[in-house]
Image (cartoon, coloured by chain):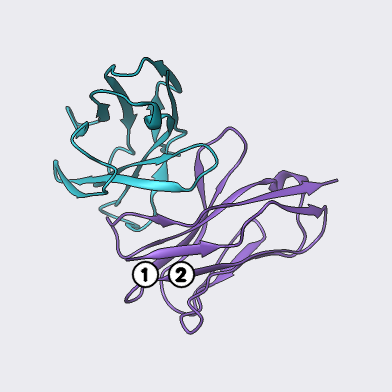
Chain colours: A purple, B cyan
Amino acid sequence: GNSVTQMEGPVTLSEEAFLTINCTYTATGYPSLFWYVQYPGEGLQLLLKATKADDKGSNKGFEATYRKETTSFHLEKGSVQVSDSAVYFCALSKTAGNKLTFGGGTRVLVKP
Amino acid sequence: EPEVTQTPSHQVTQMGQEVILRCVPISNHLYFYWYRQILGQKVEFLVSFYNNEISEKSEIFDDQFSVERPDGSNFTLKIRSTKLEDSAMYFCASSGNPTGEKETQYFGPGTRLLVL
């Protein structure tokens, strides 16, 4: 079956540091890939997505590139802020209307 | 901007009691989902719903669970006889804008269920 593996946290950074969260997946075919973010006390919000190989998703300074050859979708941000403190989830879906399969989530804490 | 809403935000119940969690998906979406997140664990798929029937369900979604879309706006998850291990955050999601983007699932804020 499909699976998503992402690095365990927590990841603790200083403000303006570079953030990378690794995500790899196992799936047949060409799934769509997503990063969701969960701020404290809130639900899941879509951060960015990519639907085919070599696509780059970007939003709020975050980027991730769909790498078919390495089955990866690593999340990066060049300069984090305290407000980026949250739990980040990598997920995949085979097609529209199909379930999302989530990774375990990575908690990120950014200190001033 | 349209959003998914869920009620109640918190629910405390006694083991063996029935609970109904309610969701209002985004109005023109076609696909509806329930997920749960046990504290500190990953988000797990429970069930998806399309065209007034279940399209997929996980092994978690056993006979004590049911879903219903009783009218054109609500989408409910019923747990008939709650167990301690049903304590979790339950998320509703919807997707499938018929005239636009169909892939992205939009999540509600969740209902935190505590079974005592």
Who's the residue at 39% across and 47% down the image?
Answer: B44
Who's the residue at 55% across and 41% down the image?
Answer: B40
- The chain holding disc 1 is A
Callouts 2 and 1 close, C-beta under 8 Å: yes
Q: What is the x, y in percent for residue A66?
A: 50, 74
Query: Residue A11 vs residue B39: left or right?
Result: right
Query: Residue A79 vs residue A64: left or right?
Result: right
- The chain holding disc 2 is A
Query: Residue B101 vs residue A4: left or right?
Result: left
Q: Amino acid at mark 1?
A: Pro
Label 2 neighbour load within 10 Å: few <14, some 14-19, many 20+: many
Work out whether disc 2 and disc 1 sit on a shared chain.
yes
The numbered mark at residue A25 is: 2
The quadrant the N terminus of chain A occupies is bottom left
Q: Is residue A74 above or below residue B57?
A: below
Label 1 neighbour load within 10 Å: few <14, some 14-19, many 20+: many
Q: Quadrant of residue A92?
A: bottom left
Q: Is residue B2 above or below residue B99?
A: above
Q: Is residue A79 above or below residue A112?
A: below
Who's the residue at 39% across and 66% down the image?
Answer: A32
Decide which of B24, B64 is in the foreground and name it. B64
Q: In this rendering, does residue B29 appear at all?
A: no
